[in-house]
Amino acid sequence: MSLAALLLNYGYIAVFLGTFLEGETILIMAGFAAHRGYLDLRWVMAVATVGSFLGDQLYFYLGARYGWRILDRFPKLKPRAVRVQALLERYHLPLIPGIRFLYGLRMVGPLVIGMSSVNWTRFFALNLLGATVWAVLVGGSGYLFGNAMELVLADLRHYEEALLALMAMGGIIIWLSYHWRHR
């Protein structure tokens, strides 16, 4: 099965799952794929908004219910949790929608916010705002990357599968090295 067929069949599912977990790389790739005509940019952004929003809502509720147990089970998260707590005390309002832009704090951020006194309705509204802005900016960046590559490479069709594969490998390598360093 070709990369184009995979994108057409499973692209939006991959965007949803990728953005539910962390997703910058998958969303940039999806924006690039939208530029190439494999996916629709509006749907990429909508699916990314929903995936990112639901992922952070889940982490918020897990934090509210099991926060300390999760941190005790995964002690390597504690330094990041302390960092999020300090940021939350100092930058309460902008931190909630902006947490997804802070690399390495995407999952632990909503978890710690759930452990705090932040009301769920406030988190819900600010999380929805943050997820929407994030999906538009990051997905749009991937789309603009496609524009830039088209200017650089006159006939991008010959290179698009290689570029998508390189982007995927780069994202996997970054993700693996990040998680390897933090273990």
Image: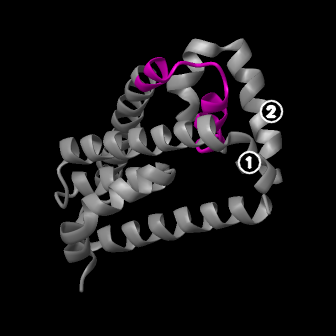
- Where is residue 120 drawn, in percent x and y? 48, 24
Which corner quadrant holds the C terminus?
A: bottom right
* Quadrant of the rendered image containing residue 176: bottom right
In the picture shown, does residue 169 fall above or below 118? below
Furthest residue in direction bottom, as rendered: 1
Disc 1 marks a residue whose amino acid type is: Arg
Quickly name the residue at label 1: 69
Q: Is residue 124 left or right of residue 78?
A: left
* Quadrant of the rendered image containing residue 32: bottom left
Residue located at (72% from left, 13% from top): 90
- Where is residue 53 drawn, in percent x and y? 40, 38
- Where is residue 92 drawn, in percent x and y? 63, 14
**Label 1 secondary element:** helix
Q: Nearer the viewer, residue 27 or 93?
A: 93
In the picture shown, does residue 69 fall above or below 2? above
Disc 2 marks a residue whose amino acid type is: Val
| Mark closer to the chain start, 2 or 1 | 1
**Label 2 secondary element:** helix
Which residues make up the magenta segment?
A: 105-124
Residue located at (39% from left, 67% from top): 163
Quickly name the residue at label 2: 82
Residue 109 highlighted magenta (yes or no): yes
